[in-house]
């Protein structure tokens, strides 16, 4: 890899560290190509990506970034999993680590906050962006449906009383 290629990789990694909602660092030593492809596919489904890069280049890319403190995690065979959604990459990596003992989560970063392995696990337990939006929409919609029910209830009660009176008069 020549100097120009290295500079390009450092720029790409810098963009990843700046624009990602969460970056998870993990060891992948001993994983097969098929297992790595499975991880990449799972991450792609969740809207994230997986990147293997030289640790030295990743450390250079981290210089001056808010998540610079994760540079200490970059030792050995490391992989970076990242996503714009602050929860997606953590969820996928946590789920994958449960099924594959060769994939070990070291930690990560969420914005400027450095996370250890337990921190990544805690982030993975949080609801995703879509789940939060659905919860908010249901909270907003519930009072409106209650109001509609309350407004409609007297009308249905009056209709019931009128039908009962009609039945009595007919009998």
Image: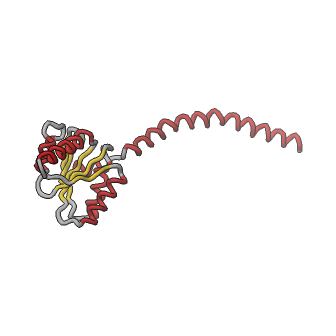
- In this picture, residue 87 sits left or right of residue 168: left
Q: Would residue 88 be visible to someone looking at this image?
A: yes
State the image quarter where residue 20 is shown. top left
Q: In the rendered view, tell whether residue 30 sits above or below residue 109.
A: below
**Residue name at image x 82 percent, y 38 percent:** 165
Q: Looking at the rendering, in which quadrant would you find the C terminus? A: top right
**Residue name at image x 25 percent, y 65 percent:** 33
Q: In the rendered view, tell whether residue 28 sits above or below residue 86.
A: below
Q: Would residue 117 be visible to someone looking at this image?
A: no
Residue 38 image point, x, y percent: 31, 62
Decide which of 94, 67 is in the foreground and name it.
67
Decide which of 72, 5 is in the foreground and name it.
5
- In this picture, residue 117 sits left or right of residue 146: left
Residue 22 image point, x, y percent: 26, 45
**Residue name at image x 18 percent, y 49 percent:** 116
Q: In the rendered view, tell whether residue 50 sits above or below residue 35.
A: above
Residue 85 image point, x, y percent: 33, 44
Decide which of 153, 106 is in the foreground and name it.
106
């Amino acid at each position: 890899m020549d100097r120009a290629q290295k500079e390009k990789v450092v720029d790409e990694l810098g963009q990843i560290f700046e624009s990602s909602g969460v970056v998870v660092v993990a060891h992948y030593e001993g994983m097969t190509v098929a297992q790595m492809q499975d991880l990449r596919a799972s991450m792609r489904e969740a809207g994230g990506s997986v990147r293997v890069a030289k640790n030295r280049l990743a450390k250079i890319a981290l210089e001056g970034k808010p998540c610079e403190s994760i540079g200490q995690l970059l030792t050995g065979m490391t992989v970076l999993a990242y996503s714009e959604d602050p929860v997606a990459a953590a969820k996928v990596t946590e789920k994958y680590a449960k099924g594959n003992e060769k994939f070990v989560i070291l930690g990560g970063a969420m914005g400027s906050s450095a996370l250890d392995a337990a921190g990544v696990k805690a982030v993975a337990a949080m609801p995703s962006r879509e789940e939060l939006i659905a919860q908010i929409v249901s909270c907003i919609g519930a009072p409106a449906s209650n109001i509609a029910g309350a407004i409609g209830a007297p009308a249905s009660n009056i209709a019931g009383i009128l039908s009962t009176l009609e039945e009595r008069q007919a009998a």
